[in-house]
Image: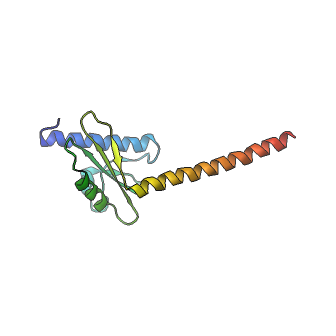
Amino acid sequence: MAKTPQSKKQKGNRLEREIAGMYRHYDIDPKATRMPMSGAMTHFKGDIWKPNDYAYVDECKNQEKVSLWAWWNQATSQASGAQTPLLHISGNYRPILTVMKVETYFDLRREILDLQTIIDEMEGKNASKTRSKKS
């Protein structure tokens, strides 16, 4: 457990680096990195700098004592305009969880289903083209 201010800061930095690494790993933003000074820059809020993905603002908390609503308020205050706040939380030997508004979750699920429908329709058209060429 992080006890000193320095070790607490390092613990938070580790989570920020891990989240930035996930943005790179999943090819969402290959330039994602930890925000210098943890979002203290005037025009760039949040803990993760993503030059190719401005839709979401990420707040990272790696602490044992969970202050969910205070952290959520911080995440939402950093989102501006149409940006969507995301809160990534973890603790010692715990998985990383991402908190978002329920509407955001269902919008993402709906988008996945819509994209799957488009893919299925395209595959159906390609399959019928292949059958007609064989005839």
Q: Choose top left, top right, bottom left or bottom right for residue 72.
A: bottom left
- Residue 122 position, x and y percent, is 68, 49
- Taking the view exactly as shown, the residue that stands out farthest to the right is 135
In percent of the image, x 41 and y 45: which residue is there? Answer: 23
In the rendered view, does 34 fall on the left or right side of 106? left
Instruction: Note whether 95 is above or below 74 in the view shown.
Output: above
Q: Choose top left, top right, bottom left or bottom right for residue 73.
A: bottom left
In the rendered view, does 90 fall on the left or right side of 55? left
In the rendered view, does 117 fall on the left or right side of 65? right
- Taking the view exactly as shown, the residue that stands out farthest to the left is 4
Please state the total of marks drawn on the protein image: 0
- Residue 45 position, x and y percent, is 30, 58
- Residue 21 position, x and y percent, is 38, 41
- Taking the view exactly as shown, the residue that stands out farthest to the bottom is 81
* The C terminus sits in image quarter: top right
- Residue 37 position, x and y percent, is 24, 51
In percent of the image, x 73 and y 45: which residue is there? Answer: 126
Q: Is residue 54 visible?
A: no
Q: Is residue 104 visible?
A: yes
In percent of the image, x 79 and y 42: which residue is there? Answer: 130
Instruction: Note whether 82 is above or below 39 in the view shown.
Output: below
- Taking the view exactly as shown, the residue that stands out farthest to the top is 93
Instruction: Note whether 11 is above or below 81 in the view shown.
Output: above
Q: How is the image coloured?
A: rainbow
* The N terminus sits in image quarter: top left
Camera-nearest residue between 10 and 107: 107
Camera-nearest residue between 133 and 40: 133
Camera-nearest residue between 134 and 47: 134
